[in-house]
Image (cartoon, grey):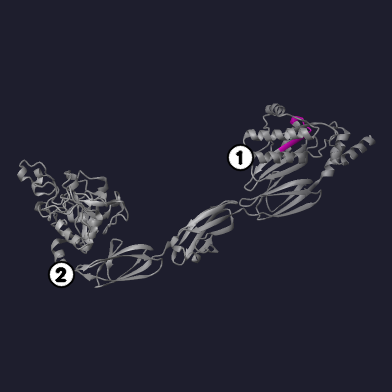
Amino acid sequence: MRKSLLFLVLSLSLPFPALARENTGDLAVMEIFFTGNELTRQQLGFLSDDIREKAVEITNFRVMSKDNLFAILKDKKINLSSSGDPEGDVEYGRILQADKLITSQIINSASACYLKLKLYDIKTANLDKSVSRETPVCDFGNLRRVVLDGVQDLLDGVVRVGEFKPGTVLAKVADKLRVQSQGFGALEINTRPDKCRIFIDSEDCGFSPRIIESIPAGARTVVLARDGYVTASVEVNIEKGKKLVLDKTLDPQTGSILLNVGNNSLAIEQEKTSVYLDDNYIGVMPRAGKILKIENVLIGQHKLRIEHPDYEPVEDSIEVRNRATEEATLKLQGKPGKILIASTPLRARVFLDGTRRGETPYAGNLSPGRHRIRVDLPGYQPKDLEIEIRPNRPQSVSLELEALAQGQQAATAGRMVLIPAGDFMMGCNEDFDRQCESDEHPYHRIYLDSFLIDKFLVTIAEYHECVAAGKCSAPDRGGYCNWEKDGRDDHPVNCVDWRQAEAYCHWKGERLPTEAEWEKAARGTEGLIYPWGNDFDCQSQDQEESRLKSLSVLGGKDRDRFEDTTPVSCFISGLSPYGLFDMAGNVWEWIRDWYGEKYYRDSPSRNPQGPPLGTMRVVRGGSWYNSIPANFRSSNRNAQDWLSRRAFIGFRCAR
């Protein structure tokens, strides 16, 4: 008996390699435990099979097949993978009647993919060995190499404890010697930052800082994790009866930001732009055309702001990801610049980008960029110019207006009608007009400053004077064009495009009317459907007495005695409320505005100027060419290519 005990003590004191191949026993390999979605169930099965095959290759254990494991555990309603609890894993080994049990777990964190392998001695209920491996990503190919390497390390030098019959004196002595030889120690864990989650051999042990008592002596793997920081894995050796202190600083997960200021106007001033991250000053932008790189930015949501003395501050949020470079472009909006406009003589009307702003001397603010200025005074040639406003910078303009010749002033006074300032209703009123088109909605109130508008359409004779003066180009000729036709001097000039019409009005010191001005001049303030009223009677029994005989709206000799256009002062019965001729019929009229189908929905309520850009210009009033009554309604809108020259389009001027 004494010899047997001596043999037992000596056997337990021998190094593991001495007995590594002495005995054989049963080794069970549980399926790999993994909760992510980077690997398929089939791939996890392949990795588990790799562990079994490697165990067969490098040990003398009888390795249980997966089918045997499944057959035994299925009846017990137990999953083939690790329970995650050492006592539970040992119990699985006992159910399988194995001598040794291998469990494995894959942990995927934001910074790396970890493999944990454990080897249990089922008879002693001890953890023989634990191995940890790391790979950058949970990729099947990488993990396969890591698994084989880890199993090699796990099973290197493993010895199977001798088989003693349970309950015998030898078994009891062996158990006592093992407990005494293993023992317990303590581990104190301090981290920077604190509140890191602690895992010891994959078991959750709470948060740092913490002192953990009664840890079985031996090699242990400590994993420390916290959102926003790189997960750390540390191998420690717990000694019997001693406390180990582990101090660990986790590296923050960081990314970087590439910042660009997207303003071409800042090409020579970018270095004046200050940069703030989460209200902390970072620095200034580099010279023009360069970007600023902000490095070592903690992952998560951040607030990025830039400031420039001549621009409004701009702020935006940005999400920074681990090890990633985020790109951000912030566009500064320039602060308004001050504009000062003076004229000789004073009290001239000031128009900025087509909108009346006041009289000279004028002071106001304008947004940065290019702007159109027009200064207009009755009896003087108007002045137009473009200016460039720089952010937060003042600019002054002084204009000297040239007086019109006496003949020009007299002609203007006789041929133009003053439309007084005030409100009128613009668009189509469906309560009275059943022919409304979608672009005539909504029916809305508009205020206009007073303006002058031609009583008559511009005639061939009047346009000829501009051509003779070298200020206008000739209209097209031939077909229904009036140019160079005998007896057409008092007919409206037609076959001119929008640019030619605008050039003529400019030569006269005037301009084309806006769409709102034209409609008010055509229908007055009563919201009339047609210039003469609300009726369009085509059913008169006596054709000679028909009211249409006195209207220049229906073309053809059998209707108004003319083949196409008519003299501009023929039809008194068709006058508008302000006494304008041909506001319905004869020719469509070029309007200053770009055409916008939905413009009425958002147009300003005072002095609207039309959309800022477009591809078509508005035409109004109907013509001899098309006899549809709906076209002659004062609210009817139409559009034409502004470069087109049509026999059914003419114009009149305003100021």
Specify few, some or many for label 2: CA neighbours under 10 Å numbering under 14, 14-19, or 20 or more.
few
The x, y position of residue 70, in whole percent, is: 69, 28
Please state which amino acid type lies under the numbered disc 2: Gln
Magenta stretch encompasses residue 99: yes
Vertical order, 258 against 203 (above or below): below
Q: Nearer the viewer, residue 214 or 327?
A: 327
Identify the mark at residue 652; answer none if there is no mark: none
Vertical order, 181 against 524 (above or below): above
Residues under numbered marks 1 and 2 in contact, where contact means CB atoms less than 8 Å apart = no
The x, y position of residue 629, in whole percent, is: 17, 44
Q: Seen in the image, is 352 located left or right of residue 651?
A: right
First in sequence, mark 1 or 2: give its number: 1
Vertical order, 587 against 400 (above or below): above
Identify the mark at residue 406; answer none if there is no mark: 2
Magenta stretch encompasses residue 597: no
Please state which amino acid type lies under the numbered disc 1: Glu
Pick the quarter of the image with the C terminus. Answer: bottom left
Residue 456 visible to an observer of this rendering = no
Span shown in magenta: 95-103
Identify the mark at residue 38; answer none if there is no mark: 1
Q: Quadrant of residue 123?
A: top right
The x, y position of residue 500, in whole percent, is: 23, 57
The total of numbered circles placed on residues is 2
Q: Seen in the image, is 427 located left or right of residue 118?
A: left
**Which of the two marks, 1 or 2, is nearer to us in this view?**
2
Residue 618 visible to an observer of this rendering = yes
